[in-house]
Amino acid sequence: MPPLDANVVAMVQGTAISQESLRRKVQERLGPSSAAMSAAKVASALEEMIRYEAVYAQARAAKFEEQPEIAARIKNLIVSQFIQHQLETEDPKITSEQLREYYTKHGAEFLIPASARGAIILLRAASKMEPEKRDELRQHAASLLLEAQQMKNEADFVRLVQRHSEHQATRYRGGELGWMTRVQCESTLGPELSDALFALKHPDDFAPLLETPDGFYILRLREVKEAHMRPLAEAEELIRYQLCRQHQSHREEEFYARMQHGLDIQINRALLESFSVPRPEQEPPALPGGRFAQRRLPQ
């Protein structure tokens, strides 16, 4: 057997383990530690590398890589690594003109919808409440609305809410609903109350008394913000991200077109059009005491 080269520490079935690869293995084991490379650590690292190469050699000899599942994994690894290598991320140079052009063409993306901040008082009405009782509650709610409209002091309104409102989420914060867009308000309170709130135009305006299946609502507008565009300075980071994505998507399309160029690619259209995927069989419903309905318990 010929002697090994000067920089080769070991040879396994024709595969050399170099001094540099052994040094990296030992350093990998030591990590950031400043401990010295003892003879035992070096020998242990070399043994690990020999085992690895021995297993690989035996796997190659057994043509293990030709097994369909393993071959598919190797193929996937090659494809994914090749794509990554070919499409390494590069930051495109985006000019201020490109940012402004995108901002102008995609204005809807930067439109901040109108929002309102309101307050409510709810007097609940039971679903089976007698008509006379409901009329009494309606009159009581109307008197509270009139009282609220005449109040000049915010503290008085807060006390009114705390005494009478049955909307537990807002009762102890003066009926405060917080800032909501029309969509958020509709999701929280329903379309009728949302329409009523956004119909109000000035702070401290009250909507007419609202009657719903839940009861009677007194609705007050505290503040309103009109719809407006987000300034370009605030949107710049998002626009830059979108332009980078567009750039990367364009590069990918060009890459896949380049990969297919010049290759013999054929598609069996007739087979493709008749192609179908069978639906998975549905398991029957389970019954108490057994897994499936048609299975009988052992006698």
Image (cartoon, rainbow, N blue to C red):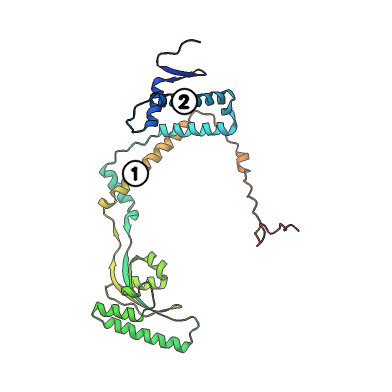
Given residues 218 and 263, the one toward you in this image is 218
Q: Which quadrant is home to the C terminus? A: bottom right
Residue at horizontal 38 percent and vertical 25 percent from the top: 38
- In the displayed structure, 126 sits above or below 62; it is below
Looking at the rendered structure, the secondary structure element under dot 1 is: helix
Q: Position of residue 148 (x, y in %)?
A: 30, 81
The dot on residue 53 is none
Q: Residues within 10 Å of mark 2 (few under 14, many from 20)?
A: some
Q: Residues within 10 Å of mark 1 (few under 14, many from 20)?
A: some
Residue at horizontal 27 percent and vertical 75 percent from the top: 204
The dot on residue 243 is 1
Image quarter of residue 295: bottom right
Residue at horizontal 36 percent and vertical 84 percent from the top: 142
Q: Position of residue 63 (x, y in %)?
A: 58, 25
Q: Tell which residue pokes out farthest to the bottom in this image.
A: 132
Q: Position of residue 278 (x, y in %)?
A: 64, 47
Quick check: 191 left or right of 205? right
The dot on residue 49 is 2
Which residue type carries mark 1?
A: Leu
Given residues 291 and 115, the one toward you in this image is 291
Q: Position of residue 117 (x, y in %)?
A: 31, 69
Say whether disc 2 or disc 1 marks the residue closer to the N-terminus: 2
Q: Tell which residue pokes out farthest to the top in this image.
A: 2
Quick check: 264 left or right of 43? right
Q: CA distance from mark 2 to mark 1?
A: 47 Å
Looking at the rendered structure, the secondary structure element under dot 2 is: helix
Q: Nearer the viewer, mark 2 or mark 1?
A: 2
Image quarter of residue 168: bottom left
Which residue type carries mark 2?
A: Met
